[in-house]
Image (spheres, rainbow, N blue to C red):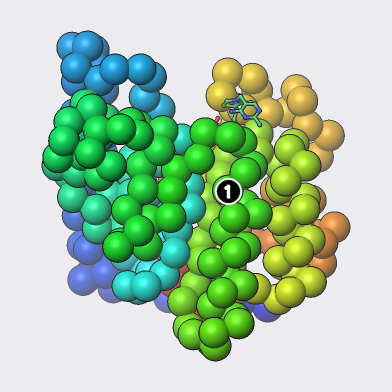
Amino acid sequence: MVDITNDDIGESNRLALWEMMLKLRLVEKKAYDLFLQNLIKGTSHLALGQEAIAGAFGVSLQEGDYTFCTYRGHAHTLARGSSIEGVLGELMGRQCGLMKGKGGSMHLTDVDKGVMGSYAIIGAHLTIANGTALASKYNKTKEVSVCFFGDGTTNIGAFHEALNMAQIWKLPIVFVCENNLYMEYTPIGEVTAVENPAADRASAYNMEKIIVDGNDADEMYRTAQALSKSKRR
Ligand SMILES: Cc1ncc(C[n+]2csc(CCOP(=O)(O)OP(=O)(O)O)c2C)c(N)n1
């Protein structure tokens, strides 16, 4: 069982998390403004209001750890230390973007920072994330892989395949479902037979489930700290 203590996280940790969350919020708001000015081509998925999740893992993970996210990945990328110029430049299709403007909002990647990609194919990245975790286990190194996804992802076959393999291989990976109650535009409860889309199903793979209020920054911090420590060898 992962031990998540209820202790006060302390002022310096709270300040670091607040600074991180503020940065994520301001950049995301800027992306929204740029989109409305038609300076961001194609579409752009924001994670306004979900900053505590990306932020808590951002301040808890170490250099060398791997993160994977969906097309809603601006905050997750920034939280690992990618530059604002690299992220917004990429959204605007500029040469200064993380992938020289060729990938855009839905494909943010920054391997030097451990940002192993943003994936527009729902569920595809869960199995890929098992790959970095397997490499860490095989090489006996201490990196942790963290894979973020939405509630709708739990209705895709790859979600089930990935959790099963991760559990069989005992991989150093944390799967984080950001349940914002909507599978993009569809209320998740209307298309899902269980109450907690990821947690209830994780039990089927004998995986420990932890349900956290993603809007409670302190609780998210404690959870991200405990989970990343518990997976580090
Ligand atoms: C394999 C696949 N099927 C369908 C889609 C179309 N699609 C785009 S977003 C989305 C819903 C995703 O919902 P969720 O995982 O909850 O993410 P969030 O709503 O938080 O962005 C779907 C089905 C897709 N991108 N990939």
Determine the residue positioned at 37% across, 73% down. Answer: 64
Left-right relation of 137 to 50:
right
Q: Is residue 202 left or right of residue 67?
A: right
* Residue at 74%, 36% in the rendered image: 155
> Which residue corresponds to the image point at 44% horizontal and 64% vertical from the top-left?
66
- Residue displayed at 58% across by 34% down: 121
Q: Is residue 95 above or below residue 230?
A: above
Q: Quadrant of the N terminus?
A: bottom right
Tag 1: residue type? Answer: His
Q: Nearer the viewer, residue 91 or 35?
A: 91
Q: Based on the displayed image, in which of its 4 quarters is residue 164 positioned? A: bottom right
Q: How many marks?
A: 1
**Image position, residue 27 (x, y; %):** 21, 37
* Residue 224 vertical placement versus 74 (above, below): below
On screen, residue 100 versus residue 62, left or right, reads left
Q: Quadrant of ligand 1?
A: top right
> Please, what secondary structure does the residue beneath circle 1 have?
helix
Residue 28 in picture, x, y percent from top left: 26, 33
Quickly name the residue at label 1. Answer: 125
